[in-house]
Image (cartoon, rainbow, N blue to C red):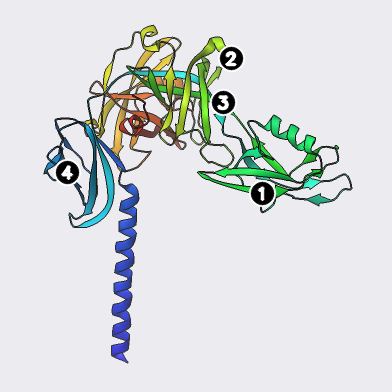
Amino acid sequence: MRSIYRNCLIVSILTAILIIIVSGILYINNNLPDTIFVNSNQSTKYNFSIPVSLDVDHKNKIHLTGKNDIQSGNVGDYQGTYKLFGIIALKNTKVKVIEKKYAYPIGLPVGLYLKTQGVMVIQVGEITDYNGNTSSPAEGKVNPGEYIVKFNDIRVSNKSQLSYLINENGSKEVCLTLKSGNTFKTVNIKPVKNQSDAYMLGIWVRDDSQGIGTMTFITENNQYAALGHGISDVDTGKLLSSHDGIIYKANIWGIKKGEKGKPGGLCGTIIYNDSNIIGSIYENNNSGLFGSVNTNIYEKYHLKKMEVGLHSDVQTGKAKIQFIYEGKVQQYDINILEINKNNKEKNMVIEITDKKLLEKTNGIVQGMSGCPIIQNEKIVGAVTHVMVDEPTKGYAILTENMLEYIKE
């Protein structure tokens, strides 16, 4: 009896250890960057904050000089493998060796207009027909977060068009093409005539998105990065699927200060006409908005070009954020409290310490996402989120995570 108990205990302990090891490996895997940037012809120290080393397929062009010291050579893309304790291969990564990049730190609030691919489904609900009966014709067929891209093989671009097509179709069954990520599906739905004599599918949708955000930097070939995070739908929380968009001049006429539990925000107006267009948007992803500008913003504000810093350039301690308000370029003191290079988006924890900025905003407010972070005369990151319960603190993204989406 004792031997059975002892064997069961040993099996339980070994199982628990195995679960801990597997969970740890999965956690480490998810927190290791898929791409690492290093400048050419220099030695770069990379600290993964976990017991992982990196082996690089050097082919006499790039090699390790010590524990995670990457001695780079020729510009190019290389393959690396993360190894736990230098033994267990975890996953592959890309090592991009690049020439030093230079850009103009901006910090200018701009108006954003993002065009979605089709219309996003926000909610599926019931319809009360002209007889007082309720039904949900789209239930189980359509899900929040999916995009309606076609109506009976007609490409859908906005919700007004969709509403028109539904009512023109009448009571006949319709075929919708839905997009979710990179996958497509088709569903058939029979419209219901409501008590106002309008045909409906029981689907609530949203199309284009507008708002205010801050431009982070502009490269020498007039490509820009902004926000430091993607634009997501307020109801579903999912990243908006977009094919293009426009950035406009924004008139910021006030600032609502942040409070504990109540994030503040920039107060402004955007006039959506051709004369106010300053650029285009070609990508919306988790690292921000990316596009090109058609005006020399850096010349207007007499901004100086700076080196774009990589992970190895960032240190905890004093830094600055740049923000253009009331036509003036201002730099404000902050502290970088934590650096987590392995997180894909929230790479830094920062704190606003500048008294002048605290008097204006009480910390980080909505609309400041994208303000460039400057340390040792290098653009090392961008503000992304405020901590709602501590408005003086927030998160930031490393510049290198934005570099990948800048077109040459």
Q: Can residue 145 be seen from the camera position used here?
A: no
**What crowding class fits label 2: few (fewer than 14 Cα within 10 Å), some (14-19), or many (20 or more)?**
few
State which tag comes first along the sequence, 4 or 2. Answer: 4
Residue 194, given in percent of the width and then of the height, sits at 83, 42
User: Between marks 1 and 2, how big is the CA–CA gap?
Assistant: 39 Å
Mark 2 highlights which residue?
A: 271
Residue, far right: 131
The mark nearer the N terminus, 4 or 1, is 4
The amino acid pointed to by label 2 is Ile
Quadrant for residue 166, please give it.
top right
Q: Which disc, if any, is residue 68?
A: 4
Residue drawn 50% across and 33% down?
A: 231
Task: Tell me the mark number nearer the camera, choosing from 1 and 2.
Answer: 1
Task: Decide which of tag 3 and tag 4 comes sooner along the chain.
Answer: 4
> Which comes before the other along the chain, label 1 or label 2?
1
Q: Tell me residue 381's x, y (percent).
A: 33, 29
Please, what is the three-letter code of the amino acid marked with disc 1?
Val
Q: Are marks 1 and 2 in contact (CB under 8 Å)?
A: no
Of residues 280 and 312, the one nearer the viewer is 280
Q: CA distance from mark 2 to mark 3?
A: 11 Å
Residue 69 in percent (x, y) is at 14, 40
Disc 4 marks a residue whose amino acid type is Asn
Identify the residue at horizontal 14%, vertical 30% (top origin): 41
Marks 3 and 4, how far apart in space? 43 Å
Q: Who comes first in sequence, dot 3 or dot 1?
A: 1
